[in-house]
Amino acid sequence: MNEPLPARSRVRDDLLADRRFVEVVVAAVHDQVPVYATLDDGRLTEVRAIAAWGVDRLLRLWATDGTLAPSDLRRFRGIAAARAADGRPVQAVLRAYRVAATVLTDEVAARAGDLTPTDGFALARVLLTALDTLSEEVATAYAATTEDLAGDRDRALRLLLDDLIAGRHASAGALTDRSARLGVHLPDAYCLLVAEPTTEGGPDMSYEAAAELLAALGDGRTSLSTVRGSRAVLLLPQAAVQRAPAALDERAWRACAITGEGLDRVAVAHRLAADALDTAPAHAHRPGRVLTDADAHLLALLAGRPAATPDHIAHLVLGPLTEPDQRHLLQALTAYIEAGSATAAARALHLHPQSLRYRLRRIHALTSRDPRDPWQRLTLDLARTIRS
């Protein structure tokens, strides 16, 4: 390795000591490359780490008139392969590096001091050489990753859902392109089903078991499956939720199905469903029924981690009962919960008991929640309470 040149080393050390520097690079990429503007905080943290490593390495090469080492190339290839796997367009990745190089040049120029034209030319040479090498490595890694994913479609589809669950998707366009390459069309109106055996303490869920449930509920063109520990996670067309209870009962599994989130919020849907399965009491699970968005949101609220406003949660549970022309049904529900029996509730409302029972059946039909079931009665009670 060459000895560091004093003037360049001064600028390098000054930049690396400036905590603001990496943030300026990341902000420029975020602002100037549309795909990066949609990244969540988790992905921006990764961008920040890559930027910190990249500028540190390039500045050290500049300070010593060094060249990229084989280890640098391996790291660039690894980063590029990860971006190819999560569907970030190669053009956007290369543009992000060009933007970062421009910011680096500007920051060095702002600290030029005793730098000479030779130092400036050396920086340009380091950056141009790095960008040229990077372009070749990225193109190679993208081609290899695409070929690998195409050769193992099942694994590629699992990775796609894994990335959606983790929030690793750059944009709607990138997701569409990636799905198209794999021959799958993700439904706009989807159901994220998280399922597990009713017996606790068993082995981790197998990919084969998750795929079998997927085959029973969806298809390879619009559906995905993966595994999280002891649970199967399926992304299905929303209509599949109607078939889920029978398939789950057959396997002695329980589940939570989230249908109210968009494709940009699969990570939120998964967190809601997983937390619901973690916290729901045993009597919340019944044959022929899965937990829904409403159950999940109520459980999140009870756990002190609300993911929606109280009004939204109340509407999810009560549905049409919130409409003015159904006020009599909400009154019947309130009387039944407070009185404890249909007879006592009918007496409080000056109704015949059969009229009260008819209203309870209407509540069940409109909300898919039976006020006579302990868990569903609790959800209805909580919903009417937070709405008030």
Image (tube, rainbow, N blue to C red):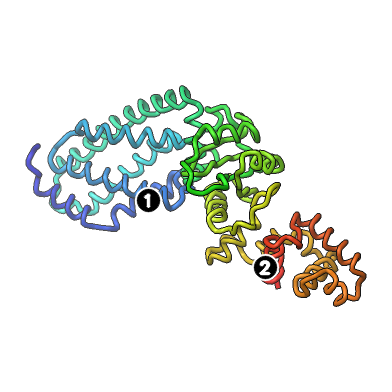
Q: Residue at x 47, y 35 (%)?
A: 159
Q: Disc number at residue 192?
A: none
Rendered-image quadrant of the C terminus = bottom right
Q: How far is mark 1 from mark 2, CA to CA?
A: 38 Å
Q: Quadrant of residue 296?
A: bottom right
Dot 1 falls on a residue whose secondary structure is: helix
Q: Residue at x 61, y 59 (%)?
A: 297
Q: Quadrant of the N terminus?
A: top left
Q: Comparing marks 1 and 2, which lies closer to the viewer?
A: 2
- Place of residue 74 in the rendered image (x, y in percent of width and height, measured from the top left): 27, 32
| Residue that label 2 marks | 382
Crowding at label 1, few (<14), some or many (≥20) Cα neighbours within 10 Å?
few
User: Quick one: 51 or 15, which is closer to the camera?
Assistant: 51
Q: Give me the residue at 91% from left, 72% from top.
A: 351
- Which corner quadrant of the image does residue 21 belong to? bottom left
Pointer 2 local density, CA inside 10 Å: few below 14, some 14–19, many at least 20: some
Q: Is residue 3 visible?
A: yes
Q: Nearer the viewer, residue 201 or 60?
A: 201
Near-viewer residue (15 or 324)? 324
Q: Are marks 1 and 2 in contact (CB under 8 Å)?
A: no
Q: Position of residue 355 (x, y in %)?
A: 91, 65
**Residue 238 can be seen, yes or no:** no
Q: Amino acid at mark 2?
A: Leu
Residue 387 image position (x, y, % from top left):
69, 70
Disc 1 residue type (three-letter): Thr
- Does residue 224 lie above or below 331 as drawn? above
Mark number, residue 45: 1
